[in-house]
Image: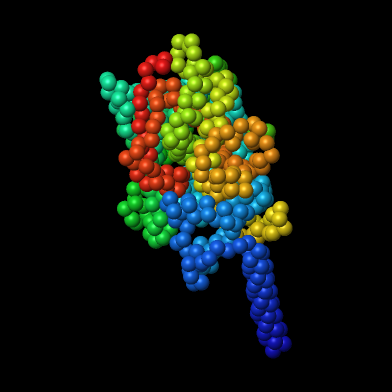
Amino acid sequence: MALGSLGVLALGSVVLALLLRWLWDTLVLVSSIRDTCHQLRRFPCPPWRSWVLGHTGMAKVTEEGLEQAEELATRYRRGCLWWFLPWMPALRLFHPDTLRPVLMATASIAPKDRLFYGFLKPWLGDGLLLSHGHKWAQHRRLLTPAFHGDLLKSYMGIFNQSTNVMHAKWRAAAGPTGAAVALEVLDQLSLLTLDTLQRCIFSHESHCQQQPSEYIKAILELSRLVVQRQQRLLHYFWWLYQLSGDGRRFTQACATVHGFTAAVVQRRRQALQRLGHQAWMDQHRGQRMDFIDLLLLAKDEDGNTLSDEDIAAEANTFMFAGHDTTASGLSWLFYNLACHQQHQDRCRQEVQELLKGRDVEDIEWDDLSHLPFTTMCIKESLRLHPPVVAVSRRCSRDLATRDGRVIPKGVICLMSIYGTHHNPEMWPDPQVYNPLRFSPENSQGRPPLAFIPFSAGPRNCIGQSFAMAEMKVVVALTLARFRIRPDPARPPRRKPELILRTEDGLWLLLEPLPKGA
Ligand code: HEM
């Protein structure tokens, strides 16, 4: 009997403890929601579509969507509150003062928001772009030396060769008369950057600029499918998506890409094991190493190396992160130079002076620092048309901004690169293409975070020097050989997808110049 009462008492205590715990959790949750709402209310909120829907559907991935981002940056300057869904608030930030705490926070305090990046996971796995925590930090340390200037130097030959292949195609399209020809450049430049990357990463010559390649076709298809999936709410559920036609195509394309990468990594690993480290190094002495070689040899201070799976994920990530971004940057640069012949002429003159008297029309590593005006034109184009228009984070703790507000933990922060680059507080007449904004004297006093095409802070773009070097080579050789004009029949309408594209391609008129002109 006494035992029975004790049992009831014990059970009662457990139930009471659980009840109290639940009450406490609820109180904490309510109070944290109240705090979050209080902090969010300190950010201005643009007019809603309706009080039930919030801003749902108002941020469009169109020309109008970009104009809206610019209007928001002009009106609210630092940032504003945005209800993506009635229960999902986000902060849209477009000023160094509000961007700084998030971009400069450690990667563990400001991790990437999974909603935004999750669709890439089955393709890219745990590569740098998507990994987090300890794994990301370790890999970032291991991979940083692979993007050092000394190694990038050895890729200059590849940048030049890939550009020559593209120009040969353009000359063939112009025919023997050398008349100006209208060409869609975004797709052509995507093939060029893929060609370059495949050679720099795998030392593989797919000749994808001249003939179809299964592997390259799969990468282009994956990029297209990820964008399409973002636009179909039902496809957000993986189990539903994989049953759809698009989902099956996605799985098939992933298999092609993963198969290619795994085979290269395996072959190299076997060669390294067969020869042994020293003999392998001796064999490669004086030769260019590709990224796979560098990743196989990468070792941190504790002797940790990368597994085959890790290497494959990083290689797939570089292929993805490095191709469309650079192609978009180059396409908009060509477009801006086409629309501003005076800047195009000045760049061409700079390049011609550099190449004067040379037997071979190649841009070398040391030339890159002797193209100051061309570099200013590239930067201004990356400002006006940033290839990546926004990056997103979801912080794991509250972060204070300079003006005394707080970015609450758990809230999506959409850091608008496009909005920041069009914020009139830092960029007067933001729609005007004016490379002189980047002259040394005009750059003085401008906050570094006003210009962030490669993002900033611990998770900035690891490939930015690679991309800048490639862009300089491609634009310098192109201007030495072609005059670029806008195609009046097909003015572009911008379309911000994974990268800044256009609705119907980017068409330009390319007129071959006589040799040595
Ligand atoms: C004009 C060309 C490029 C632009 C505008 C660009 C832009 C960016 C931006 C904005 C980010 C930050 C993404 C985020 O926070 O979610 C990023 C990250 C990254 N980029 Fe680039 N990128 C370019 C070229 C490249 C190239 C050529 C490579 C490699 C060969 C590359 C590899 C990466 C990687 C691996 C990351 C993730 C870094 C990390 O999280 O640690 N990018 N890039």
- Image point 55% across, 17% down: which residue? 285
Q: How many marks?
A: 0
Identity of the residue furthest to the bottom in this view: 1
Q: Is residue 74 left or right of residue 199?
A: right
In this orientation, which residue lies closer to the viewer: 111 or 287? Answer: 111
Quadrant in the picture for the N terminus: bottom right
Identity of the residue furthest to the left in this view: 176
Taking the image as drawn, is residue 325 in sight? Answer: yes
Q: Is residue 28 left or right of residue 507?
A: right
In this orientation, which residue lies closer to the viewer: 421 or 37? Answer: 421
- Name the spot of residue 417 as percent of width and height, x first: 55, 47
- Name the spot of residue 439 as percent of width and height, x first: 61, 32
In this orientation, which residue lies closer to the viewer: 81 or 242? Answer: 81
Quadrant in the picture for the C terminus: top left
- Name the spot of residue 466 as percent of width and height, x first: 54, 31
- Image point 44% across, 21% down: which residue? 480
Examine the rendered structure and indicate whether residue 15 appears above or below residue 284.
below
- Image point 53% across, 28% down: which residue? 374
Q: Based on the displayed image, in which of its 4 quarters is residue 152 positioned? A: top right
Taking the image as drawn, is residue 262 in sight? Answer: no
In this orientation, which residue lies closer to the viewer: 255 or 35? Answer: 35
- Name the spot of residue 7 as percent of width and height, x first: 68, 82
Q: How is the image coloured?
A: rainbow
- Image point 44% across, 25% down: which residue? 479
Examine the rendered structure and indicate whether residue 391 appears above or below residue 162.
below
Examine the rendered structure and indicate whether residue 445 appears above or below residue 150.
below
Q: Is residue 355 left or right of residue 179?
A: right
